[in-house]
Amino acid sequence: MADRARVAVFISGTGSNMAALLYASKMPDCPYRIVLVASNNPQSPGLDLARAEGVATFSLSHRGMGRAEHDAAMDQAVLSAGANFIALAGYMRILSPDMVKRWEARMLNIHPSLLPKYPGLDTHARAIAAGDSHAGTSVHLVTDVLDGGELLGQVEVAITPTDTPQSLAARVLAAEHQLYPRVLASYVARGSDPRFLLRRIRNLALDLPETYERESHGSAGFRVGTEKSGKFFAYFSDRHHGTPYISLLVKCGSMDELENLVEAQPHIYHKPAYYGASGWIGIILNRADTDWDLVSDWLQRSWRAVAPARLTRLIDAADSF
Ligand code: GAR
């Protein structure tokens, strides 16, 4: 499959969730592959399994190291493996704010409770002690709030009258093995889902001053100015004219700049049919590691190129403060 997302998995122990992610990745059509298994515990049994399965591994004990220093070494291993996502799977370390920020929206975690209930440790004992009818597991994005980022999926697991924390943990683990691969697959696949990409572009484009959406030849287009005299500054193009690209078309400075960018970075830019000839460049969005800051910069630049002077003057005045 073209351009599968590259995932690094962080573990500290058994790694049964890592194994579930790995075996799911061997199914046809799985949109991700595991390119690295990394651990803060060189004795993690999960590392042996990863090696036996031919997956690259990295381990570095955190003992005697500062948190930021250890995270930086893990991060370096992830970058060397070319991963674009990190899946925490029983990684029993809190990450430094820097590391969390660097992987914002690209790092997932699985936690053995129905979040927001029972963040932290001893989740099964706490659910039993509280007399809950159900425990469960959650997959969420990692933010600087412990077990607190956006929830991506949950499975409930019934608590039986004879459950102990151990027996409950074993059943929750079985549920986790079903949940995590599915949630990870659908999360990484969002990057090639035109509805998701259009929503993101729409939010960025309509955030700029005096903009509105108008369809153009069956595509979503975005204009600046008044309804009557506004001008297009961006189009959303979904695999038009036989290209494999879902892309954002924006105004390029000159034909030279366009040709140079497409030649130098063909994984990011393309020259769209028809529009290319009039100076519109395509920024490819259906990639595993789309740089949304770059997309946002281009939208602003293109907006500025066609916006009426009364609007750009206002922005320039605001910028000079
Ligand atoms: C899993 O139950 C996971 O949810 C939990 O550790 C276990 C790891 O098992 N994670 C946490 O508690 C994170 N705070 P595994 O090593 O067999 O995947």
Image (spheres, helix red, strand yellow):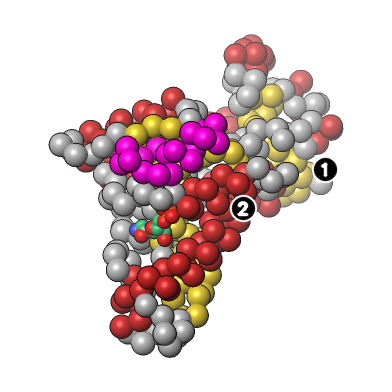
Q: Is residue 74 above or below residue 206?
A: above
Identity of the amino acid at label 2? Ser
Image disc number at residue 217: 1
Q: Is residue 176 magenta?
A: no
Circle number at residue 87: none
- Disc 1 or disc 2, which is closer to the eye? 2
Can you identify the residue that label 2 sits on?
186
Secondary structure type for disc 2: helix
Q: Which residues are magenta?
A: 38-55
Q: Amino acid at mark 1?
A: His
Q: Which residue is pictured at 50% across the width and 75% down the height? A: 157
Which of disc 2 and disc 1 is earlier in sequence?
2
Q: Tell me residue 127's x, y (percent).
A: 36, 78
Question: What's the residue at 84%, 32% (across, down)?
Answer: 242
Is 309 or 189 nearer to us in this picture? 189
Residue under the point 41% across and 85% down: 162
User: Image quadrant of residue 112?
Assistant: bottom left
Tag 1 near tag 2, CB within 8 Å? no
- In front of the other: 223 or 54: 54
Whole-number angstrom distance, CA of label 1 to CA of label 2? 30 Å
Q: Position of residue 105 (x, y in %)?
A: 46, 47
Secondary element type, mark 1: loop
The response on whether ligand 1 sits within 8 Å of label 2 is no
